[in-house]
Amino acid sequence: MNPSINLLDRMLTRSRQMLDMGRRVEARRRLDKLLTFPDVPETIRIEAHRLLGEIHLDAQCFRRARRHLLAALGLAPNDAETHYQLGVALDLDPDIDPKRAAREFKKALELKPDEARYWSGYGQICLRLGREKQSFGAFAAAADLAPMDLEVVDEIIDGLCFLGREEDARSVLMSARFRFGHSEDLEQLWNRFRFLQLHRKQQASKRRLAMQQGEAVILPFVSSKESTVPKVEGEPGILRFDRGSRPLPHTLRQPDPKRAPQ
């Protein structure tokens, strides 16, 4: 006898709760079991695959994450959030051509062009591909959408600094401080930005002074496979080509209508 819709719905809700509590192994087992039942409604099956994709992505099991996200897209090919999640999974996998991730981010933007996270992700992948003009346009679009997400702001700042648009990065930070008000995380981001700006100026002044005094100046070697922007030796890195040095993202889940808003 097939399980009732109510039972399947309760299993999905309980899986979300376990995921929120960090009990990912239990959530994964419950979701795997849910998908074995026959005649599971399409909406529940889509959400289960998406949650499993998130779980495997956090565990850096990129192939399994892609398999579940592709299964969700097979059921809902025009879901922008799933395309974005798949783009993230492809971007994080070092063995995958970043052009594949770029296609997924672009598809997500076609479906939902007013989402700042999608523009920021597309800007990051364009940096990896050396498409600086497209990257700047994506970061500018993300900034114009005024995201209320500090991780997105962080990505925008890093990307703009990498492109040499430091004044634009400063403007984004100032706007974020106005929107967020007092925020410890934002203040840390602001202080880090100011420290690195000051450090760069000090290093540039030292090099200019050494050249004026006729001293030898050893410039840092920059590999052709790396950044086209010179990096000061000994300078702490803030800029990144990809998401590898970031915490794995927690993807946006569909709201549960049975749970009361906080």
Image: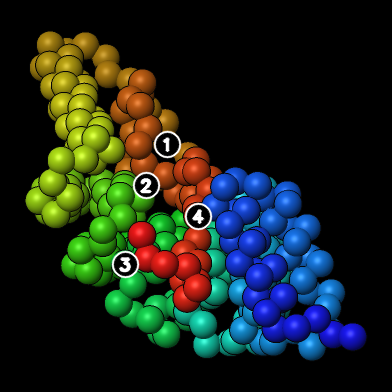
Q: Earlier in the sequence, mark 4 or mark 2?
A: 2
Q: Is residue 186 above or below residue 102?
A: above
Separation of marks 2 and 1 at Cα, in angstroms: 7 Å
Indicate the secondary structure of the residue bearing disc 4.
Answer: loop
Q: Earlier in the sequence, mark 2 or mark 3?
A: 3
Kindly identify the residue that appears in the image at 9 percent across and 51 percent down. 178
Q: Where does residue 127 sit, x and y in percent of width and height?
A: 40, 57
Separation of marks 4 and 3 at Cα, in angstroms: 15 Å
Kindly identify the residue that appears in the image at 42 percent across and 62 percent down. 121
> Do residues under tags 4 and 2 come within 8 Å of each other at their CB atoms?
no
Indicate the secondary structure of the residue bearing disc 3.
Answer: helix
Q: Nearer the viewer, mark 1 or mark 4?
A: 4
The residue singled out by tag 2 in the image is 228
Classify mark 4: residues with Cα within 10 Å, few (<14), some (14-19) or many (20+). Answer: few
Q: Which mark is residue 87?
A: none
Q: Where does residue 57 sit, x and y in percent of width and height?
A: 63, 55
Q: Earlier in the sequence, mark 4 or mark 3?
A: 3
Separation of marks 4 and 2 at Cα, in angstroms: 31 Å
Q: Earlier in the sequence, mark 1 or mark 4?
A: 1
Q: Quadrant of the N terminus?
A: bottom right
> Do residues under tags 2 and 1 come within 8 Å of each other at their CB atoms?
yes
Q: Nearer the viewer, mark 4 or mark 3?
A: 4
Q: Is residue 119 above or below residue 1?
A: above
Kindly identify the residue that appears in the image at 50 percent across and 43 percent down. 247
Horizontally, residue 173 falls left or right of residue 230, namely: left
Q: Which mark is residue 222?
A: 1
Q: Where does residue 156 sit, x and y in percent of width and height?
A: 29, 54
Horizontally, residue 115 falls left or right of residue 164, namely: right
Q: Where does residue 259 sit, x and y in percent of width and height?
A: 47, 68
Classify mark 2: residues with Cα within 10 Å, few (<14), some (14-19) or many (20+). Answer: few
Q: Which mark is residue 116?
A: 3
The residue singled out by tag 4 in the image is 250
